[in-house]
């Protein structure tokens, strides 16, 4: 599903991005991965984080002392939130952005709010 994004301002006047989308996940046989990537490379445009090839996505997830976010997912709650820090570099330089994100799921709709820090 295509996602929509918009720039919004938070109270501290930092620019943040909000993404409203639906996510669907599929298991892909390992034997098809190279073929699928080759096909996608012909029709997709790489984003600004992709310098010459693929890049990693590095996340640190936060939870409460009694693991509320984890158990909310395991219990199959249709409405849940999680907080994470995300970087597109394994060892970010001081000038590279790291994002603080709140990802909220309500049934199949996902809202991701992020601010660069």
Image (cartoon, grey):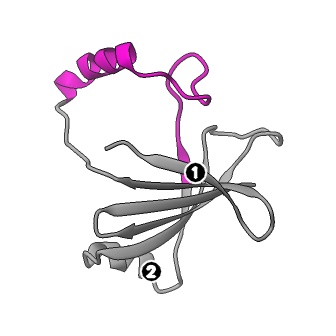
The answer to which of 104 and 71 lies nearer the viewer is: 104
Q: In x, y percent, where is residue 13? A: 80, 62
Where residue 15 appears, as percent x and y from the top left, is: 73, 54
Q: Quadrant of residue 18?
A: bottom right
Q: Which residues are magenta?
A: 30-59
Local crowd size for mark 1, using a 10 Å CA cut-off: few (<14), some (14–19), many (≥20): few
**Mark 1 touching mark 2, by CB under 8 A?**
no
Residue at 35% in and 78% down = 72
Q: Position of residue 27 (x, y in %)?
A: 19, 41
| The image quarter in which residue 106 lies | bottom left
Taking the magenta stretch, the answer to whether it contains residue 50 is yes
Instruction: Quadrant for residue 50, please give it.
Output: top right
- Would residue 80 be found to the left or right of residue 87 on screen? left
Whether 16 is drawn above or below 77: the answer is: above
Residue topped by disc 1: 6
Quarter of the image with the C terminus is bottom right
N-terminal-most mark, 1 or 2? 1
User: Which dot, 1 or 2, sits closer to the camera?
Assistant: 1
Q: Residue furthest bottom?
A: 66
Does 106 sit left or right of 9 as displayed?
A: left
- What is the count of numbered marks? 2
Q: Position of residue 37 (x, y in %)?
A: 32, 21
Q: Secondary structure at mark 2?
A: loop
Between 65 and 28, the one nearer to me in the picture: 28
Label 2 Cα neighbours within 10 Å, binned few <14 / some 14-19 / many ≥20: few
Magenta span contains residue 45: yes
Residue at 69%, 40% (x, y): give it: 91
Q: Secondary structure at mark 1?
A: strand
Left or right, residue 48 beside residue 81? right
> Circle 2 is placed at which residue position?
67
């Amino acid at each position: 599903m295509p996602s929509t994004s918009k720039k919004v301002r938070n109270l501290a006047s930092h620019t943040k991005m909000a993404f409203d989308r639906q996510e669907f996940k599929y298991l892909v046989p390992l034997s098809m991965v190279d073929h699928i990537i080759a096909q996608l490379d012909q029709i997709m445009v790489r984003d600004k984080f992709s310098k010459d090839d693929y890049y990693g996505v590095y996340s640190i997830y936060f939870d409460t002392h009694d693991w509320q976010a984890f158990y909310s997912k395991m219990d199959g709650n249709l409405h849940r939130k999680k907080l994470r820090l995300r970087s597109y570099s394994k060892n970010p330089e001081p000038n590279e952005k790291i994002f603080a994100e709140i990802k909220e799921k309500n049934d199949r709709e996902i809202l991701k709010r992020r601010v660069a820090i």
